[in-house]
Amino acid sequence: MNHQEYSLPPLRQSLFFLGLRNLTLLERRINDAGSPTRATVMARNQALLA
């Protein structure tokens, strides 16, 4: 079994966690603005990614 498959490359891993952190900050900012439902947040995130 190749162990390399299970660990992401350091760069991709840090980018991944950075992205997660940015999404969390974005969610918090949107929640502070008007506290919409999670579905609204998800839709807004999808719009940003599109």
Image (cartoon, helix red, strand yellow):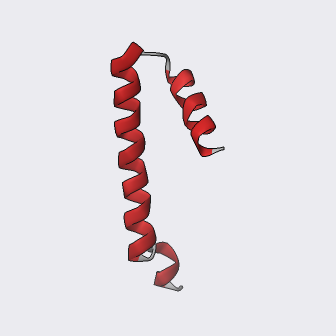
Residue at screen point 34% across, 38% down: 25
Q: How many numbered marks appear?
A: 0
Q: Where is residue 44? Give x, y as percent.
A: 56, 30
Residue reaching furthest bottom?
A: 2
In the displayed structure image, the side of residue 47 where residue 4 appears, left or right: left
Q: Position of residue 39 (x, y in %)?
A: 56, 23
42 is higher (above) or lower (below) than 7:
above
Relative image position of residue 11 (x, y in whole percent): 41, 73
Query: Left or right: where does residue 26 sit relative to residue 41?
Result: left
Residue at x 50%, y 23% (from the top left corner): 38
Residue 34 in which image quadrant: top left
Question: Taking 41 as reference, is 17 above or below it?
Answer: below
| Foreground of the two, 2 or 28 | 28
* Residue occupying the point 35% across, 28% down: 29
Quarter placement of the N terminus? bottom right
**Residue 41, position in %: x, y?**
51, 27
| The C terminus, quarter of image | top right
- Residue 29 lies, with reference to residue 8, above or below; the image says above
Along the viewing direction, whichever of 5 and 47 lies nearer the viewer: 47
Residue at screen point 60% across, 45% down: 49
Find the residue positioned furthest to the right: 50
Q: Nearer the viewer, residue 35 or 9?
A: 35
